[in-house]
Image (spheres, rainbow, N blue to C red):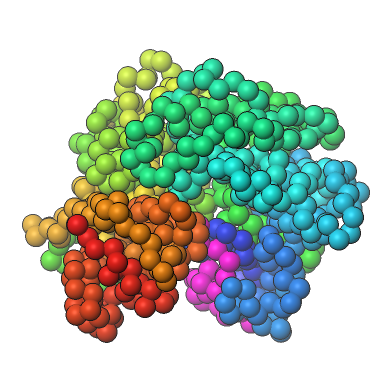
Amino acid sequence: MTSSKKPLYVLGTGLSHDGSACLLKDGRICVAIEKERITRRKHDGLNDTAAIQYCLDAEGISLNDVALVVQNANFGMLKHGNDWWYGPRLLNNSLPVITISHHLAHAYSAIGTSQFEDAAIIIIDGCGSGLDDCIDLDGAIVTENPPEELRHLYFEKDSYYTYKNGKLTTIFKDFSPSGASLKGYPLYPPTTMHSIGGLYLAVSMYVFRGFEDPGKLMGLAPYGRPGVYDFEIFELKDGRVYVRYDWMSNFDRPCRNPEQFKDNFQYYADIAYWVQREVERAILYVFNSRYELAPSDLIAYAGGVALNAVANRRILTETKFKDIYIHPAAGDNGVAVGCAYYGWLEILKKERVLHSGSMALGKPYPAQSIREALATHSSSLKYSEEENSVKKTAELLAQGKIVGWFQGGSEFGPRALGHRSILADPRKPETRHFINSNIKFREDFRPFAPSVLEEDVSIYFNCNYTSRYMILIADVKPEWAKSMPSIIHEDQSARIQTVAQSISPKYHQLLCDFKKITGISVLLNTSFNRRGMPIVETPEEAIRFFLNSDLDLLVIDNFVIYKGAVKDQKHTNITDKFIQNLRAALENSFAVGSGIAGTYRFDITGARAVTIDLSTDNPVIVEGVSSTKSTAIIEIAESDIDDFWNDPQGEGLRLIQDGKVKINGPQGKVMKLVNSLRLV
Ligand SMILES: [Fe+2]
């Protein structure tokens, strides 16, 4: 018998950096999306209109169908109303809206999606809510007790809870003051003092100039040498982590551009090695200390620090916790999920509905919309709709083809898990370099991760655990090391994804078919994006990426797509040349003139971005999107770059008038920049 009962929707929304929205339908996630996937700006956050609208559209409902909204803004509790947050919001006064503090939202993201019934929960990140905003202090050990007027200057850095019989209890919360007072050091913590996440972010910004994910530091670490730095960054006492700041003055060579990074690779790698080891030491200390306060066999873990896959293995193998669940979107992108679950479990007091385990929470695209997207590029590609696209893909992968693999809804979280992936045969040693330089345009040191059939994982890896979200590492068995050179890191480890039939049946089948042909059930799996850009979301974005890269094949659901005889002009060369010319122009004794200081982002054909950062004493040009707010964002097609730049007053203005170049921000400043920074 079918029920005509109206579904009960709870909307969770995250208003931090890495913003997102998540919709629960009768206690189950029906859709969730990170804002960056829609706006195409990496780590985009704050205003939540785009993310909420995406969720409502995917479900075909309006806000009036939502019973409850729960939100988290990290800084502040939106005490002045819910209709404005860095721009107008969709929420209105007729909707019940609850605001919760930051670590509590992270905690519920872990509870909501874990398979554990009862467990301890730990949250570690760079910076959470202010002490005065926290609503989870009751009965807990709270490390700081500043006077009332200073409470807003102390922020969450780690929190420990237990979850038993549906009840969350706060055990321990550590706070530290803001790190702004140390701004004199190149390595100053941009967030909370003494926080592991803040330190990691600071070092990442020092090494990479902050334009990339802090996770890159983890990838660089194995190239560093032990013993180059050996003093302790952290002082660990009384169950708390303190960052010692006395060593910072020794570090005065922050990376300013990619060339400097390349020329000083060993220097930065040695720092990464040392910091990674120290961070692992601090994380293990926190886990061990919290265990003693409230022992538990199982632990659920979230917060940005939980993205450290190398430390995660050590938690699993070296602490007293017997099993760990790590939220796949452990950073602030996950707080919307936690908000939604808080609403369902804590406000509405509903039964917990076990999560399916799948993180493919984006909306699927109907076959007709894929056909329409393909039709707009019909002169550049040919395609067929195949009943057995999986088998066909496995055959082509085994022949050495590199494949864009787009299936159903996108993954929620930073890792591609077989829905928006670039896949390749892991056996060819040259594949890693080829994908890094011709497809993803990123540094060669960056490793690729393997997907492996879950039932086969112990054949290839020293591993007796699952890693469904690519958030744990394992060592490759020596006898397989030579067979899979493109997915093994410098230290013989790999950040594995174990693929379960119950969670990803199609991707599982692909690995099975690949195994039938090649004898191995492992594929190289990297996210479907270029360096500095968010993962592709729509079929149109995937097709454009395909046509402008050296991918051999694109598979969107059951559509198998090849490049046609008439190739699109290679975008890589034009944009690469543009970046090169800009850098040369900047070095050509360019001085930031009055009125143009700021950060300018050029989004080129929606697939690549170039940021010109003139906001500091050391202006730079970087491929990718700056974490700082842009003064202006300029959308431009690659084919228009030359005309726009060479003749700003004539062709440039015409392109703007025709809507071919869109400027979001002060046009006068942008034109001044173009006039001042003449390409060489
Ligand atoms: Fe956080």
- Image quadrant holding the C terminus, namely bottom left
Instruction: Judge from the rendering whether residue 143 lies leftward or rightward of residue 97; answer left or right.
Output: right
On screen, 550 above or below 371?
above
Residue appearing at x 81%, y 50% in the figure = 168
Q: 501 or 246: which is nearer to us?
A: 246
Outermost residue to the left: 565
Residue 211 in percent (x, y) is at 45, 50
Residue appearing at x 22%, y 60% in the figure = 679
Instruction: Judge from the rendering whether residue 145 lies leftward or rightward of residue 526; answer left or right.
Output: right
On screen, 540 above or below 353?
below
Determine if residue 429 is in view: yes
**Residue extent of the magenta highlight:** 42-65
Q: 6 or 537: which is nearer to us?
A: 537
Determine if residue 541 is in view: no
Residue 453 in percent (x, y) is at 43, 34
Residue 55 covered by magenta stretch: yes
Residue 653 covered by magenta stretch: no
Residue appearing at x 38%, y 37% in the figure = 261
Residue appearing at x 75%, y 62% in the figure = 100
Instruction: Judge from the rendering whether residue 385 lies leftward or rightward of residue 664; answer left or right.
Output: left
- Image quadrant holding the N terminus, namely bottom right
On screen, 149 above or below 54?
above
Residue 104 in percent (x, y) is at 74, 54
